[in-house]
Image: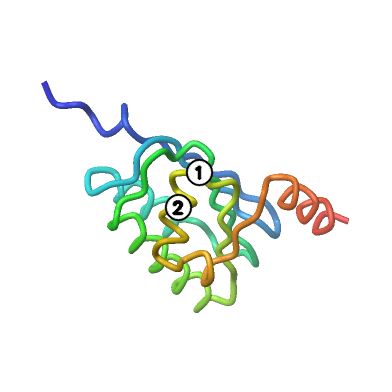
C-alpha cells in the first residue's frame, strides 16, 4: 500500500498585513513539492514571505528548485523570501547548494522581533 502524500507532508499559511508565514512539515520531494509550490504561489504579495522549515526533515533537489523559483517569483513582485529555522538536515542541503547565500535564513527569535517591529 502506497503512503499518501498527506501523511508525508503538510503546509499551513497565515496571512498578515506585511508578512505571509508558511509552515511546512514533512518531506519535500518529487511527490510533495507540488503542495509546497502551490502554497508559495498562492500566497498574496507582501513585503516578506517567511517559510518555516523546522518541521521539514528532507529537502530534495526538486525542493531546492522550488525554493529558487519561489525566491525569484517573490523578488520579481518586490518581496523577499526568508527561510526560518531550517532543520539541521535541511540546513546542510542549503549550504551544500549555496542557497544560504541567496535566500536569507533566520531563527524564529529574529522573525518574531521583525514581526513586532513591522506591527509597531
Q: Residue at x 50, y 56 (%)?
A: 43
Q: In the image, residue 120 lies at what x, y percent?
A: 88, 56
**Mark 1 highlights which residue?**
88
Q: Residues within 10 Å of mark 1 (few under 14, many from 20)?
A: some
Please indicate whether residue 57 sits to the left or right of residue 102 in the image. left
Q: Do the residues bearing badges 1 and 2 touch, measured as CB atoms within 8 Å? A: yes
Per the image, label 2 sits on a secondary structure element best described as helix
- Report the colour scheme: rainbow
Please indicate whether residue 66 sits to the left or right of residue 79 in the image. left
Q: Residue at x 58, y 77 (%)?
A: 78
Q: Say which quadrant the N terminus sits in.
A: top left
Please indicate whether residue 20 sits to the left or right of residue 102 in the image. right
Q: Furthest-top residue in view?
A: 1
Q: Furthest-right residue in view?
A: 120
Q: Quadrant of residue 82?
A: bottom right
Which dot marks residue 4? none
Q: In the image, residue 73 lies at what x, y percent?
A: 44, 72
**Mark 2 highlights which residue?**
92
Q: Quadrant of residue 64?
A: bottom left
Quick one: 83 or 70, which is closer to the camera? 83
Q: How many marks?
A: 2
Q: In the image, residue 55 lies at what x, y percent?
A: 49, 36
Q: Residue at x 74, y 52 (%)?
A: 110
Per the image, label 1 sits on a secondary structure element best described as helix
Q: In the image, residue 44 lies at what x, y percent?
A: 53, 60
Q: Residues within 10 Å of mark 2 (few under 14, many from 20)?
A: some
Please indicate whether residue 15 sits to the left or right of residue 33 in the image. right
Q: Residue at x 34, y 54 (%)?
A: 63
In this rendering, the answer to whether 74 lies above or below 17 is: below
Quick one: 3 or 40, which is closer to the camera? 3
Cα–Cα span, label 1 and label 2: 6 Å
Amino acid at each position: 500500500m502506497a503512503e499518501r502524500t498527506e501523511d508525508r507532508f503538510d503546509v499551513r499559511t497565515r496571512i498578515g498585513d506585511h508578512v505571509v508565514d508558511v509552515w511546512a512539515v514533512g518531506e519535500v520531494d518529487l511527490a510533495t513539492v507540488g503542495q509546497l509550490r502551490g502554497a508559495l504561489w498562492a500566497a498574496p504579495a507582501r513585503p516578506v514571505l517567511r517559510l518555516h522549515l523546522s518541521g521539514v526533515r528532507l529537502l530534495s533537489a526538486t525542493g531546492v528548485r522550488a525554493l529558487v523559483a519561489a525566491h525569484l517569483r517573490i523578488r520579481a513582485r518586490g518581496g523577499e523570501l526568508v527561510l526560518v529555522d531550517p532543520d539541521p538536515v535541511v540546513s546542510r542541503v542549503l549550504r551544500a547548494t549555496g542557497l544560504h547565500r541567496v535566500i536569507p535564513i533566520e531563527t524564529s527569535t529574529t522573525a518574531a522581533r521583525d514581526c513586532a517591529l513591522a506591527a509597531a
